Image (spheres, rainbow, N blue to C red):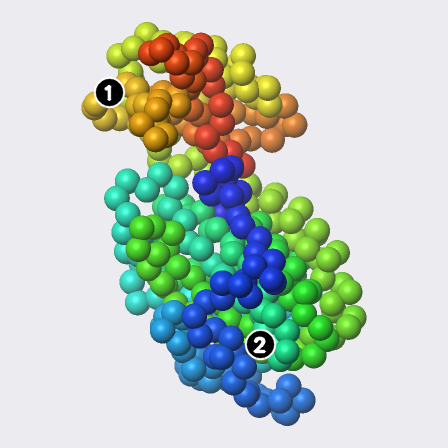
Amino acid sequence: MVHVRRWLAWSLLGCTLLAQNPLKGIKSALSKALPPVSAPVKAPPVAAAMEETLPPDETCGPKTAVFAKSRITGPRPVDASTRFGGSDRIYARFVLPKPVRDYIREAGVLYPVVVVQLTASQPDQSPCSFESNHLLSEADLAQDFLDVEILPDPQTARILNDNSFSWVIAQCEPGPVHARLQARARDGAMEVLGCGDFVFDLTAARKAQLPGDRETIKRVAEENEAAARSLPKDFNDKGSFRDAQLSLANIRALIQRDLKDVAQILKIAIREGSGDDWTVQSEDGVPRFKMNFRPIFVAWKGKDGKSYYGRVDLRRNYQGGGVYGALFAEHGSVNRFNGKVN
């Protein structure tokens, strides 16, 4: 799952912003008493870990989240818990009754995304929240679970966009932190995959450590994500356009001219299908620009030596009087991958 420019950019929500528009009922739910952190609590089994959470409200969804102190690699984590000490790592998995694909209901989604939100709350404090966009591969969509890294081991982190969950925890004061994790599909209906709650005993030492951990997580997770990611199936398409301006040769020339971060084009693919070559984007009935109707996918080697793929858009801006300007290329999305091209 990676950062995707513009419409897939992750959003960081400040405490005051969330306080102005909180999830309905979440503050009251998170304020309900749990056993004090100092009380001796045994790590519960998976079933109990889901049952011994805060009561759900109507926005939370089913309690499908399981939490653990180490990475969850099987159906039953050996150290499942809903309470964590100051030095513990925190991982989560949403265990679902159907494949993730079945939650993505919007037709024609180019890059399927699940939004994972962590909200942390303490008495007399405004809750803080962060939303992480999980960009899903074909393998992710086929699974009946979704993994999340809340406070992972920085040296083995794998999910780049989850790095700011540590920021959320760091906004809290030392003491018990009540937290809720929710996942929902990013489509027209925003279907909720589920949620879960846990308590973290934040120490002053761990709070001071979290900013450094976050920087390491970002660096390590970016490389691990890229090494594990292959080109998506979109690159198997063999579509074409009728307009000579959108020929493969012209597309290649425009990319090399306009996209200054591209050192070498590795592969170009055009979405198969019919229809017009161009689509006009308007605002208040006035054309703004026209661009290629079907997506163009490009894999390239960057000038930084890393491998990337994404969507490239070819645009002509409207100049008035029925006239459009010169054609140019721009990035529609940018993602890292392992550099292997078929």
- Disc 2 + disc 1, Cβ < 8 Å: no
| Amino acid on which the number 1 mark rests in the picture | Asp
Q: Where is residue 151 in the image (x, y as percent from the top left)?
A: 62, 64
Residue lying furthest left in this view?
274
Q: Residues within 10 Å of mark 1 (few under 14, many from 20)?
A: few
| Amino acid on which the number 2 mark rests in the picture | His
Q: Which of marks 2 and 1 is nearer the N terminus?
A: 2
Give the CA separation, mark 2 to mark 1. 53 Å
Q: Residues within 10 Å of mark 2 (few under 14, many from 20)?
A: many
Q: Looking at this view, is 51 or 76 the one in front?
A: 51
Picture quarter with the C terminus: top left
**Image quarter of residue 303:** top right
Q: Determine whether 29 is above or below 253 in the image.
A: below
In the rendered structure, find residue 86 and report the number of the disc placed on it. Answer: none
Residue 157 visible to an observer of this rendering: no
Q: Where is residue 233 in the image (x, y as percent from the top left)?
A: 35, 35
What residue do we see at 30% from left, 19% from top? 278
Of helix, strand and loop, which one carries label 2? strand
What residue do we see at 64% from left, 86% from top? 37
In the rendered structure, find residue 276 and report the number of the disc placed on it. Answer: 1
**Which residue position is annotated with label 2?**
178
Of helix, strand and loop, which one carries label 1? loop
What residue do we see at 36% from left, 63% from top? 192
Q: Position of residue 293 (x, y in %)?
A: 31, 24
